[in-house]
Image (tube, grey):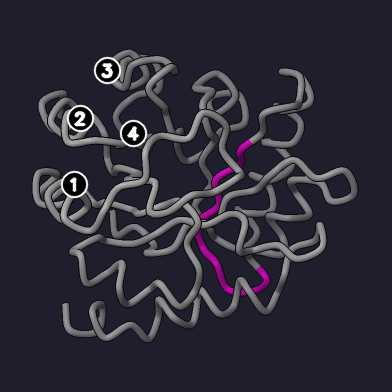
């Protein structure tokens, strides 16, 4: 599967639902959405995931669920992104089957080596690129040499950099050898999805010299 190069992450907002955020992402041109919630109950998260999945189907966009393989399964998502404290990718693969996307989190060279050895994940979220307040218990920020080494170790597994990214970072990130990137905070302004911010990312990725030359 040719994965989109840019992934948008939803967040818990008081006035804008995850489905509404998903629609804003897709209308601005994004074609990969990850729903991420740290405050919803299971039933609330499931409803948000099902609603967001419907929006992504409308736009023929990929839809994945952060942390919960069970939510991903029930919402008929395209995949799940698993962190170090979630179900192991191997068990998730056994439960979800071969067609579902499974992403893993890589915060260090050791994480990268484990992910490669497991041979299960379809892509890796690598970071943090810089400090971000959208994630609790943030791992240490990776410098450019660490990022390059991790991406090299991942080899053919597509790497998506994440952590405080802005549209102006696109060419720099891709020059490290990353396949793509993921963003959350930069997609919002004053508690609402920023169409301008989302489109800047989409356009920057689409016109990146690193991608065009690949």
Q: In the rendered structure, which segment of residues is drawn in magenta?
A: 27-36
| Residue located beneath label 1 in the image | 157
For marks 2 and 4 on the same chain, the one whose residue lies earlier in the sequence: 4
CB under 8 Å between discs 2 and 4? yes
Disc 2, SS: helix
CB under 8 Å between discs 2 and 1? yes
Tag nearer the camera, 3 or 4: 4
| Residue located beneath label 3 in the image | 90
Residue 115 numbered tag: 2
| Residue 24 on the magenta span | no
How many angstroms separate mark 1 from mark 4 (CA)? 11 Å
The percent position of residue 119, horizontal first and vertical second, equals 15, 29
At 74% across and 36% down in the image, what residue appears?
A: 48
Disc 4, SS: strand
Question: How many numbered dots are placed on residues in this image?
Answer: 4
The residue lying furthest to the right in this view is 15
For marks 3 and 4 on the same chain, the one whose residue lies earlier in the sequence: 3
């Amino acid at each position: 599967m040719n994965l989109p190069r840019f992934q948008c992450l939803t967040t818990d907002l008081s006035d804008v639902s995850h489905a509404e955020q998903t629609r804003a992402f897709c209308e601005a041109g994004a074609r990969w959405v990850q729903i991420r919630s740290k405050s919803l109950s299971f039933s609330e998260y499931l409803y948000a995931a099902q609603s967001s999945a419907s929006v992504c189907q409308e736009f023929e966009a990929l839809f994945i669920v952060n942390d919960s393989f069970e939510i991903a399964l029930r919402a008929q998502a395209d995949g799940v992104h698993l962190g170090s404290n979630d179900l192991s990718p191997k068990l998730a693969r056994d439960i979800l089957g071969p067609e579902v996307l499974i992403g893993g989190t890589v915060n260090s060279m050791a994480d990268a080596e484990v992910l490669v050895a497991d041979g299960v994940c379809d892509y890796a979220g690598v970071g943090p690129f810089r400090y971000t307040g959208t994630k609790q218990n943030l791992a240490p920020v990776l410098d450019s040499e660490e990022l390059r080494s991790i991406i090299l170790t991942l080899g053919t597994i597509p790497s998506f950099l994440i952590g405080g990214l802005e549209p102006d970072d696109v060419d720099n990130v891709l020059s490290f050898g990353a396949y793509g990137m993921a963003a959350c905070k930069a997609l919002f302004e004053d508690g609402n999805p920023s169409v301008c911010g989302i489109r800047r990312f989409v356009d920057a990725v689409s016109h990146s010299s690193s991608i065009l030359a690949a």
